[in-house]
Image (cartoon, coloured by chain):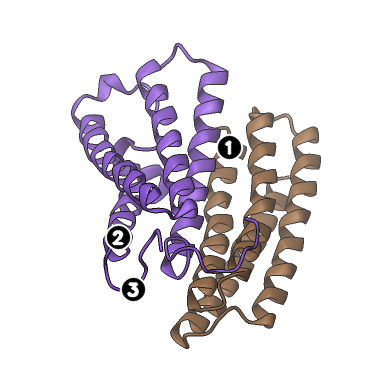
Amino acid sequence: MSGAPEVRTGLSSGPGRVLVFGYGLFAVAATGRSLVQLGADPGRAPFAYSLSVVAAVLYLVATTCLLAGSRRAWTIALAACSVELVGVLSIGTLSYVETQWFPDRTVWSHFGQGYGYLPLVLPVLGLAWLRATRPGAHGGSPGH
Amino acid sequence: MAVVTDWLTWTVVGVGLVALVVVAVALVRDQEPQDRTFALLAGYELVVLVQLVVGCVLLARTDRDVEGVLFVSYLVGNCFALPVGVFWSLAERTRWGTAVLGVAVLTVVALQLRLETIWGGGA
């Protein structure tokens, strides 16, 4: 954001640049969705709407950590992407099995169908990118 | 009325597809974002801004059951995708910068689907 020279980290450069943009988009999309849902009628589907908030927070955390790029940020990003993947897989499955739990949709229901399945693709790409940039790995080493 | 929205939506989608082809060619050639790509996206942004204005006017005149706040927030959000994408790609003078531009264009095209749905009165 500050336009500082690219000396800090590899986490938000190269393919990471695209990833941060994607995560940023979903942070905005999920935040917007949860605000609209909670603002309109919070009582209609509390479970689904809470999940939208959780998704929004996770996308925000992942975006921030990829931008920060420190070793600790790498670890937190790994946790966020992992929870996200587990979340989209379990909620995706539940939305087919326990349809009555979801009177309204969330970002993650039906494996992110309403978002071109990108909520399913994004954490996989995120984990792959974190693996490629893991501390001590050849190439981008956060922290140094 | 519907003719106007159709015409406008298809223009936005059409220009978006052209931009996607340009970006795809640049990606295949392993090019960083080119000046002509930025020029194309600047023109595209103008189309999107026209859509914002026309969309608001149509919303004010329509007797359809459209969720106004949602519709306008999508129209406004739509105007931010390209400038933010261009800004974000400036520091990445590689093919990945070009890829960022592609994602920004895809976002605008995808948002057209949502706008159509909202205009149609769906959820």
State the residue in front, B118 or A138: A138
Q: Quadrant of the C terminus of chain A?
A: bottom left
Res. A131 in view:
yes
Question: Label 2 lies in what chain?
Answer: A
Q: Are marks 3 and 1 on the same chain?
A: no
Residue A69 vertical placement versus A109 (above, below)? below
Residue B37, percent across and down? 65, 78
From the image, tell me which residue sits under label 3: A139
Dot 2: element? loop
Q: CA distance from mark 3 to mark 1?
A: 46 Å
Three-letter amino acid code at the position of disc 1: Ile
Q: Circle 1 marks a residue in which chain? A: B
Residue kind at label 3, given as amino acid type: Gly
* Residue named by callout 2: A135
Q: Which of the two marks, 3 or 1, is nearer to us in this view?
A: 3
Q: Residues within 10 Å of mark 3 (few under 14, many from 20)?
A: few
Name the residue at the left extreme. A97
Q: Colour of chain B?
A: brown
Q: Is residue A98 left or right of residue B82?
A: left
Q: Are marks 2 and 1 in contact (CB under 8 Å)?
A: no
Q: Is residue A110 left or right of residue B34?
A: left
Q: Residues within 10 Å of mark 2 (few under 14, many from 20)?
A: some
Mark 1 Cα shell of 10 Å, populated few (<14), some (14-19), many (≥20): some
